[in-house]
Image (spheres, rainbow, N blue to C red):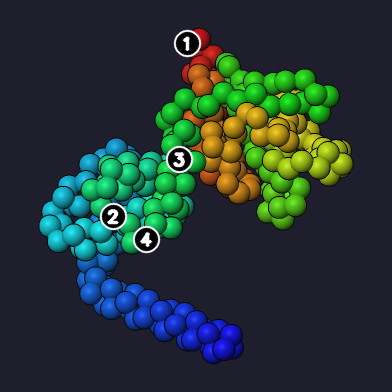
Amino acid sequence: MMKRIAFIAAFLLSAASAFAQELDSLEFERYRGLDSLLTQFYYTLEREDPEVKGVEFDGLIETCKDSLTRQHVTLQIFDHYRFSRLMGDETVAVHIFDNWLANGRVKTRSEFEMMDAELFANFNRESLIGMDAPRIELFKPCGGGKAIPSEGRISVLFFYDTSCAKCRLEAQVLPTIVKEVDFPFDFYAIYVGTDRRDWNAFRRNFRLNNKNIRLIHLWDPEIDSGYQKAYGVTGTPRLFVVEPDGVIIGRRLEMTNLMEMFPVLRAVWETYEKYK
């Protein structure tokens, strides 16, 4: 009897999976032309500010009178901008969530999809481009507290884990990248793990041989600071750049992107020094 029930359950799961795939295929065919137009729209708006993109997509979603079409368009736009590699596009995804999904004007396809969307929005909304960087209290290797980012200095926040291969790679290339930097800034290497021995080993091998850069090692093993939500640290590495006046001007960066920002950061520092 148990074998028969297990067989029936397996059959039903298989049938449900096949049915879902068939629905996905039908949806793809139904909206293929519309998705092509959306792709063109993304490209047309690529150089616009996130605020402009938000207004344009609000208008587009409003024109969708059929509920299923409106749902498809809204979720496609949300997914495009939350997974976009263009810095700042997360702002558009958060806007779409707040303006259409959170209030129920557009329903997600499942409760899980809604939870996923809400998680993304809540873990990104506090650290978007142009916002004041959240102030968090972390701990030095000696145990003393340190509030970051710095006031009056450019700050780079690098959230990493010693078990993260990409983090280790970026840490290896960073000394070369910052070797020629000729303006001051603070580099915060923030360990998100809890193993002090691993952290000690990482710190011994991680050096930035540039007198213009102040390297500060920090961690928060109990996560009392709430840095995960404040800076959207749901994975590693995470890299943020903050102006001397505390405004975020770079997020979700690669180390190569940081290098590309150096001319801008130098100009930011010179302007700050001139008018402070």
Question: Which numbered disc flags the more N-terminal residue, 3 or 4?
Answer: 4
Q: Position of residue 102 (x, y in %)?
A: 32, 44
- Left or right: 60, with 270 as reference point: left
Which label is found at residue 252? none
Residue 203 appears in the picture as rendered: yes
Question: Which numbered disc flags the more N-terminal residue, 1 or 4?
Answer: 4
The residue carrying mark 2 is 107
User: Would you call the spot at circle 4 few (<14 residues within 10 Å), some (14-19), or many (20 or more)?
Assistant: few
Amino acid type, callout 4:
Ser
The residue carrying mark 3 is 122
Above or below residue 271? Residue 258 is: below
Amino acid type, callout 3:
Asn
Question: Which numbered disc flags the more N-terminal residue, 2 or 3?
Answer: 2
- Residue at 77% x, 41% y is 194
As drawn, the residue found furthest toward the front would be: 1
Q: Position of residue 191 (x, y in %)?
A: 72, 39
Q: Quadrant of residue 33?
A: bottom left
Q: Quadrant of residue 260?
A: top right
Q: Position of residue 202 (x, y in %)?
A: 82, 42
**Of the two numbered discs 2 and 3 in the rendering, the one whose residue sits closer to the viewer:** 2
